[in-house]
Structure formats: structure tokens, C-alpha cells
Amino acid sequence: FKLEANVAMKAAVEKIKTKETDPLKIALRIQELVVDDLKTILVPPVYSGFRLRTPVEVWNTGYGTEPEKSLLFAALLKQAGINGLFTAAAFTGFMDGQMANPLLFTEYYVLADFGKTGMIALSPIRLHDQNPLVSQPNRELAILIPGKGLKTVKIEQEQNQLHLDGKLTVGDNGKTIGVCKASWSGILQPYLRITRNEKAVSGLFTDGISLQDIKEYTVIENQPLLLKVDYTIDKSDALRGSSGLFYLVLPQLNGDAATSGFAELPSKRTESLELPAVTYQDYNLAITLPAAYGFISPDLTKSLKNSAGSVEISFINDGKTVTVNRKLLLSTLVLKPEQVSDLKALMNIWLNKNYKQLILKKI
């Protein structure tokens, strides 16, 4: 594959480089150009006999297939001084290190080298929050270099964890203040999203706390596989009243299993179910109640362990402060049909709204 570029392609790269100096940010801006400005045509490569047009031809026509746009992406990265390898992904077992059937390739990527940051796979047809190959141990990556033997790369299982530690105080008027320490690791870390725009960390709560409730934040660490952020919370009215009761929705982070579509699981299934990744989620909250309100729910301890993983939830009230601990482990990557009911049982507990909120009543 010749990664040649014409004058217009070189000019497009130079325009990006005048605005960005960091190699990863340059690559992400080039990716946005390839994804957004060039149309993707969904023609399987087999229909062209796996013959691909050159990057210049794709640029001039303004459209290309996924592998053609991958070559164009690699050519543009080359102009920016970034080494990008043309690659294809397939399920583990379909490549033996020497041979591969291109009919079994599922996606195409450019594997870009960012030195100390490492190698990151970037798609030519969609923007991902994280390296799409993180924690995909059931897949392999084929590096496609003409004239050289096939090289395959196995993908490791990372520690995919989500943590939230918070101390919040609720006033009589519902105003809630406090601090939260959050972390995301592995596939749950939206590394590319945060690299594109660090302000995006303000939008990493999906329930209980919204963008306007974050008074300030500090990014403690943002590495390819780990993000740590400290938040200062100032929420004007956290209590929602109904029929004499008041509800306080607990904070939930981006990447929580509640947002993964598991609420729609059928009670029975005839085929195996593959989870996006093995994950562990842990919430630890200490919430000081307003003097005029009482926590009406009794102390609660709920736990379940089965073939799909485990869930533990506890609410402990000492009269002034409610301590909430919620833990979920999804430990089986591929569930057999008879195991899907175990996953559903775990998720029924995790998604139960009574375990995701505090119910208060005026004293």
C-alpha cells in the first residue's frame, strides 16, 4: 500500500498542525476529518476482489470503504510525522500468525505509534471514547504490510474498573454540597474523549449529578488506561418531592452497567451473549441528611453471587449520615444461554431504583 499524498492532503494536515502540537491531538483532528468529511460507503471489500483505491483517489472522490479510508488515514498521519499501520481485527482463532482469511476481518483500524503514550488503534469511520481494542481478549489484530509476513497482535484483558467515593451534605432546602473522587480504568476510561476536550470530564455523571452541579473539577491523572478526577459538588435542589416523600437520586458515573442496555435482557436466550468487557464497579457514598428530614428506609444489605458475577448493596443509617456501598462485578465475558438468567438476576438488583436513591420524610 503506497501512502502517497497530494497537495490538498498535505495542506489539510498542515492546517491542523498550525492549531495543534501534541501528536495525539493532531491524530485525533485528522481522524475527525476522515470520519466526518469523507463519506463511508458500505461495500464489503470482497466485492472489489479486495482491491483498494489509493489514498489520493479516495481523497479526490470524497468517499471510500472502511479499508480505503484506513489507508487514507494512515497516509495523512504519515504527512504529520506519525507512523500509522494499516490493520484489521478478527475474532481470536481465525489467524494463526502466518495466514488469515480477509473474509473474516470485522473492522479496520490505523494503529498509530505515539511513543511513550503507546500504540492506539483509531477507526476511519467512527470516533470512539477509548481505544476500541482495549480489553478485547477475544480478538486479534492483523498488521497488513505488503511484501512482509503477516503479523498478529493479541489483545490483553485490562482492569476495567469504575470507582466513586463521595461525601455529600444535604441541607434543609435540598441544597447538596460535597466532594467526589472518581476513577475510570481500562475500557471504561474515555481517554480519547477527554484528550479531545478536557472539559468533557464535567459530563461524566449520568445520574444524580449533572453538568451544572459541578462547581469545579481537577484532573488528577489522565493516562491511556486510567482517569482520576476530583469534583466539588454544589447542587441547588437535590430533593424531589412526591406524596409527602422526598427522593435523593444517587450519583452514577459514565460507563456504569446501567447504561449498557442490560435492562432489556430477555428471561430466556437461545444463543450465547458476549459482554463488552469484564468490569468491576464500586460506589462508596457518605451522605449527611438535613436536620428536618429522616431516612425512612431500613438498613439494607443485598447480595448475590452466581456464574455471571456478583452484586453487593448496603445502606447503613446512623441517624445523621447514610453510608451507601454498591458493588458490581461482571466476571464472565461470554455467557452461555443458560447463564444469561444469572446476568439478568444481577442486573435486576443493580438497576432497582430503590437501591439507587434515598427516600426521606420530613420529621
Image (cartoon, grey):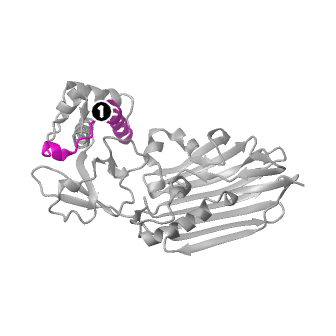
Instruction: Assign the magenta stretch its main secondary structure.
Output: helix
Residue visible at 67% across and 56% down in the picture: 166
Residue visible at 46% across and 71% down in the picture: 339
Question: Which residue was labeled with disc 1?
Answer: 39
From this view, report whether residue 144 is shown above or below residue 298: above
From this view, report whether residue 305 is shown above or below residue 109: below
Give residue 17's quadrant in the image.
top left
The total number of labels drawn is 1
In screen coordinates, is 184 left or right of 297? left
Tell which residue pokes out farthest to the bottom in this image: 306
- Quarter of the picture containing the N terminus is top left
From this view, report whether residue 317 is shown above or below residue 196: below
* Residue 303 lies within the magenta run: no
> What percent of the width, then of the height, locates residue 334?
40, 67
From this view, report whether residue 353 is shown above or below residue 200: below
> What percent of the width, then of the height, locates residue 327?
60, 65
Q: Residues within 10 Å of mark 1 (few under 14, many from 20)?
A: some
In screen coordinates, is 96 left or right of 115? left
> What percent of the width, then of the height, locates residue 301?
69, 71
Span of residues in magenta: 22-51
Residue 114 visible in the current orientation: no
In screen coordinates, is 62 left or right of 336? left
In screen coordinates, is 69 left or right of 202? left
* Residue 44 lies within the magenta run: yes
Q: Nearer the viewer, residue 226 or 63?
A: 63
Q: Amino acid at mark 1?
A: Lys
Residue 301 visible in the current orientation: yes
Residue visible at 26% across and 39% down in the picture: 73
| Secondary structure of residue under mark 1 | strand
